[in-house]
Amino acid sequence: MPPVFQKTQVSMNEPNTMTGDVSQAEVADLTSAAGTRSLRAERIRRLKRTFVSSLLMRPLAVITPFIIAPLFLRYLGQERYGLYATVISLAGFIGMSNAGITLGLVNKLTDCHVTGDRLLARRYVSSLTFAMLFIACVGMVIASILVPILDWKALLKINGSLAAIETPWAVWITAIFTLLGIVSGVPRAVYFAYQDLEINNYWDGASKLAVLLGCIAVIYTPWGLIGIALAVIGIPAIVRGLNTLSLFFLEKRWLRPSLALFDRSLLRDAMVQGICLFILELAVYALFQSDNLLISLLLGPSAVTSYDLVGRLFGLAYGVFLMVLLPLWPAYGEAIRRGDLAWVRRGVRLSLIVICGGMLCFGLILYLFEAPIFRFWMHGGATVVVSKSLILAMTATFVLRAWVDCRSVVLNPANILWPQIWFFITHAVLNVIAAVLLTPKMGAAGVAWATPLTALLTSAWGYPLLMRKFFREAGKQPGAINPLGFPVVLSEVDPAI
């Protein structure tokens, strides 16, 4: 197994007021039992603040798609709604063009947070921000060249003439604003690393509210797919741009990027982790988010509609649990670097019970009451035919996704990346093969069943194996986990998760 933490070079001889390095006395205090309890209390306090802000803001994430899906379906019609869902899926792939830089930045800034090195943190932020700005500019040029020359009507099997005219413009707008959003992704990485996720939640809430208002307004215009692309993709990019200015000029001015602090070696260092996380993210996205695109290519955009609507309901439910799960990434990262593995174990156990059980209950409710739920959601308007098989497949998919994600938020900050990459790449490849084979017989439900069936061959058993190996190796080599030499807390012995 590769080392779970690369030791950051910091001076322990004396405190440094400029960089925020900790002194020997501070290290000694933190290594005590009281220090461990104090660190746990602070970690839990930040998680509680994040949870409260999520409770305040998360309803917007639930309400927005719940409201706009039936509005868009009536506004666009069956085929153009399917195209909208397909374009949104394309946006996710375009957004990965940052090559995982922001994900690599999270882990590097977490290291700096634990060591208290502000100067190194600013150098990382400067190096990666300008790299992402360069990637965004190159990407916008490429998109502006490729989008007009591709035959979107043939590629996406478009029948309507209006849809054929709108689609290239919608794709171009989606690409441009998604690429602009790459640079404005830096604040999220900073909030994650410094466990200030409550601030991120408030900005995310502002973005969701602006999107909701924009989506309601656009259905009263003749802009069609183009207007929807501006509302759904453009507005969040603008809000996050304002967030970026606020972070660097008001909230954390000591992190403001400077071209003079650009360092190729730091960029390369972060990119090593970033590229691994990018490959992992790409494999995860190909597995869980490319279904709409795959169905559109195999069956046409009209077949995407019912699949997308069921997926949105499950995504809304899973999003509620993510407000608890995602803040654990930086919390686990800090706990691992301080050697507090007992706290990590408890968190994993609890999240597995709550999230896997919660998704199973949600799937059962939707299976039993699918008809009234969809009538209520569509306001008695558009009729959506949903098969029970599709609901069962989605339930299995999201339960297994929770089974994996509850562990990945430990393995990612611990830099256990390549084993995850191989599991997910294998899973994604098998998933595409299974989907192609099952779709002719089962329709869109075949694409849904492909994911949980292939998970049983790969990640379903692979992630528990990785966790057992991680805890076993971490207990043997505490020095490889925390750079300050804090003792690993393994007082609560239980079977590895």
Image (spheres, grey):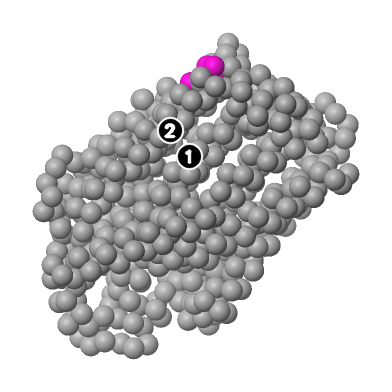
The x and y percentages for residue 238 are 68, 62
Q: Residue most toward the top?
A: 441
Q: Nearer the viewer, residue 1 or 448?
A: 448
- Amino acid carrying label 1: it is Tyr
Q: Residues within 10 Å of mark 1 (few under 14, many from 20)?
A: many
Q: Nearer the viewer, residue 146 or 478?
A: 478
The answer, for residue 419, to whether it is visible in the render is no
Taking the spot 27% from the left edge, 37% from the top edge, the residue there is 464
| CB contact under 8 Å: marks 2 and 1 | yes
* Numbered disc 1: secondary structure: helix
Magenta region's main secondary structure?
helix
Give residue 349's quadrant in the image.
top left
Give residue 321's quadrant in the image.
top left
For residue 309, side relative to residue 416 (left or right) = right
The answer, for residue 43, to whether it is visible in the render is yes
Taking the spot 45% from the left edge, 71% from the top edge, the residue there is 124
Quarter holding the C terminus is: top left
The x and y percentages for residue 78 are 76, 27
Q: Residues within 10 Å of mark 2 (few under 14, many from 20)?
A: many
Q: Which residue position holds label 1?
A: 318
Taking the spot 16% from the left edge, 46% from the top edge, the residue there is 472
Cα–Cα gap, marks 2 and 1: 7 Å
The x and y percentages for residue 127 are 50, 71
* Numbered disc 2: secondary structure: helix
Q: Is residue 390 magenta?
A: yes
Residue stretch in magenta: 388-392
Q: Which residue position holds label 2?
A: 359
For residue 350, side relative to residue 405 (left or right) = left
- Amino acid carrying label 2: it is Met
Picture layout, residue 273 above or below residue 124: above
The x and y percentages for residue 444 are 60, 21
